Amino acid sequence: MSEVETRLTSDAADYEALAPITGWAYGDDASSSLEWLKRAEPGSLRVAGRSGKVEGGLLEVAMGQWFQGRRVATLGVAGVAIAPEARGRGVAIALIGATLRSARQRGIALSTLYPSTYKLYRKAGYELAGCLCRFTLQLRQLPRAPLVLAGRQQADHGPADRAGQRVAAERRAVLAGKQRLEDLRVGHHGGHRHH
């Protein structure tokens, strides 16, 4: 089996070759996938394959994240797609590895993506980061309150209102670095928040 080759490209033939693979991977058709790929910055398409045949690809998206008021160059990885017949043959890990090596050579310190599978991306050095807090409430269980107009004092409408104010205050404390997210625990006993 020959070695997987990768390259950044702006070649229309590479876009055409990757479009049906991307469509298959994401449950879309080739023409819609081609339109999506072409909306990316020129030169941001990386393809991979053997013997000149495109077997997969991804988009490299120039991004930035802010740390202590400074922008840190970040590479977003999007639309990773591998042809069904090429799966399990090292194409994906070669593609991601080449992408990360190239980013490092360009001085890019971070890379982010939304993983479809953890095993592949952990093998390449990615790990879960960040958090998503979601609160689910049934509207019928919330107390009804009159509309509060701008400029008027907001009234306390009971336990649900106070719980919402506590959640907002805790979120502000976490974002300001005054409280750790891990220290917050949400209990489901009677709808109260427990610390």
Image (cartoon, grey):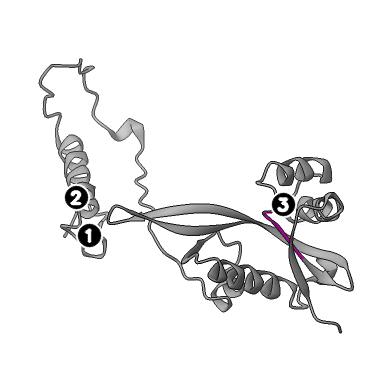
**Could you tell me if the residues under marks 2 and 1 are in contact, i.e. CB atoms within 8 Å?**
yes
Q: Amino acid at mark 2?
A: Glu
Query: Quick check: 164 above or below 67?
Result: above
Read off the residue under disc 2.
170
Residue 88 is left or right of residue 179, and the answer is right
Q: Confirm whether the magenta stretch covers residue 45.
A: yes
Q: Which mark is residue 26?
A: 3
* Residues packed near mark 2 inside 10 Å, few (<14), some (14 to 19) or many (20 plus): some
**Residue located at (88% from left, 68% from top):** 52
Q: Amino acid at mark 1?
A: Leu
At mark 1, the secondary structure is: loop
Question: Alpha-carbon distance for marks 2 and 3?
Answer: 38 Å
Q: Earlier in the sequence, mark 2 or mark 3?
A: 3
For the question of whether residue 92 can be seen, the reply is yes
Q: Amino acid at mark 3?
A: Tyr
At mark 3, the secondary structure is: helix
Read off the residue under disc 1.
184
Residue bounds of the magenta highlight: 43-47
**Residue located at (39% from left, 59% from top):** 130
